[in-house]
Amino acid sequence: MSATQVPPLPTSLAAAGPALATSYPVERLTLANGLRVVLAPDRSAPVVAVAVVYDVGIRSEPPGRTGFAHLFEHLMFQGSENLEKLAHFRHVQGSGGTFNGSTHFDYTDYFEILPARALERALFLEADRMRAPVLTEANLRNQVDVVKEEIRVNVLNRPYGGFPWLKLPPVMFDTFPNAHDGYGSFADLESATVPDAAEFFETYYAAGNAVLSIAGDLDPDRARAMVERHFGDVPARPAPARPDFAEPDLTAQRRSSYEDKLAPLPAVAAAWRVPDPIRDLAGYLPYVVLAEVLTDGDASRLVERLVLRDRTVTSVGGYLGFMGEPFAVRDPTALVLQAHLPPGGSVPAVLDTIDQELDRLATDGLAPGELARTQARMVTHLLRDTDAMIGRGLTLAVLELQRGDPGLINELPRWVASVTADQLVAAAATLRADRRAAVEVVAEGAK
């Protein structure tokens, strides 16, 4: 299936009705150089959000270059063809806007939110670095040091640093793309070269491998003209063939542990593979809802049992994808549960209790109102997130990138509401110990 094709909406979803659908207007166009553009006019506030999302992420890094996708995100802020270093920062902030970028397993995004009158400025900034970032030895060495410091702050010198998003994939997966450290090793980062960066840019930062979205106070005709003016002459390069990252599911339980010298309390994270989020949406959605049924709120299954009744954990959470973005991830991915334990807590006992609760759900089904309560909260969160202009812009861009249809933003609430109790129970029955990967944090900080 190509990047611009989407399977038909499953019958189980199509029957859910339009009541929960939003109606954000969405327009699409594709420039001659292959750049896909999504426009979402909304005159409710005088602001615009601009997002550029590239189809490259942590899983695209080659062996020996761990952390390179994140490093390159930093390099994209170090000047471009017509702008000196730090000019991007100055122009956005001088317009009264904010900006950022982030690296994910399957994509990298760059975004600004500004007053509506500054739209053309934002488009110029993004087009200029899409055309030619400044890749120099000085910039590279500087940003390697910045990323190394980020690793020290967020992973090495922080309790539970990298838990579980860095620690669990190598337990669950065998292939380099899925299992390696996305933050990167110091050795790999220090050995990166300017030719490496230039090759990465040429391969993955092609206009044909990107989506530009603009959401907010805009006139579509004027926005199209501005997009063409600034992005139309970006050189056309074809999108690279996207590798198949698939690998077999687990057939036996996998367990691992590591010592954390800063962690004051033990912790555990467990994960199970789930159906393909893109090609098997109907099979995937029950797991999205199941994670919330298990962990969202005091009345949820695992909070009620582990935190409030047994008191074997101090907190428990569940989500889809190692970064918790259920509608912005490709296969393979997982349902993840993580918990922090009190002093002297037993990880095997916690995992056994999780197994018991999953079995109870698969055998006895849901309590009256349990599913409806969870779906109502989930829909509320989706509506809140896409009501914010930057959340809307990023969601539109990723839906275009991964599913070829940004208009699906209006279906997200209905997708969640369409999951039935029978589907959720069937999903719970698949979360068996022999398909589970788990990693334990051995707390050394309390000693």
Image: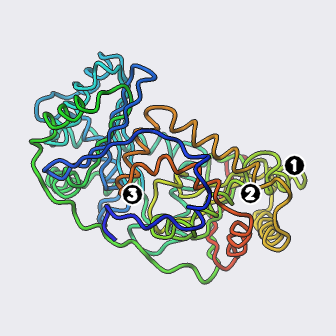
Q: Position of residue 431 (x, y in %)?
A: 68, 72
Q: Amino acid at mark 2?
A: Leu
Which amino acid lies under the numbered mark 3 shown in the image of this protein? Asp
Which amino acid is tagged 1?
A: Leu
Residue in view at x 62 percent, y 50 percent: 261
The relative height of residue 366 versus residue 78 in the rendered view (above or below) is: below
Q: Kindly tell me whether residue 354 is visible in this rendering.
A: yes
Q: Which residue is mark 1?
A: 308
Whether residue 144 can be seen here: no
Asked if residue 299 lies left or right of residue 294, the reply is: right
Tell me the element at label 3.
loop
Q: Are marks 1 and 2 in contact (CB under 8 Å)?
A: no
Question: Which quarter of the rendering shows the N terminus?
Answer: bottom left
Q: Residue at x 69, y 60 (%)?
A: 290
Write down the residue under mark 2. 294
Is residue 378 rendered to the left or right of residue 347? Answer: left
Which residue occupies 38% across, 27% down? 113
Residue 106's label in the rendered image is 3
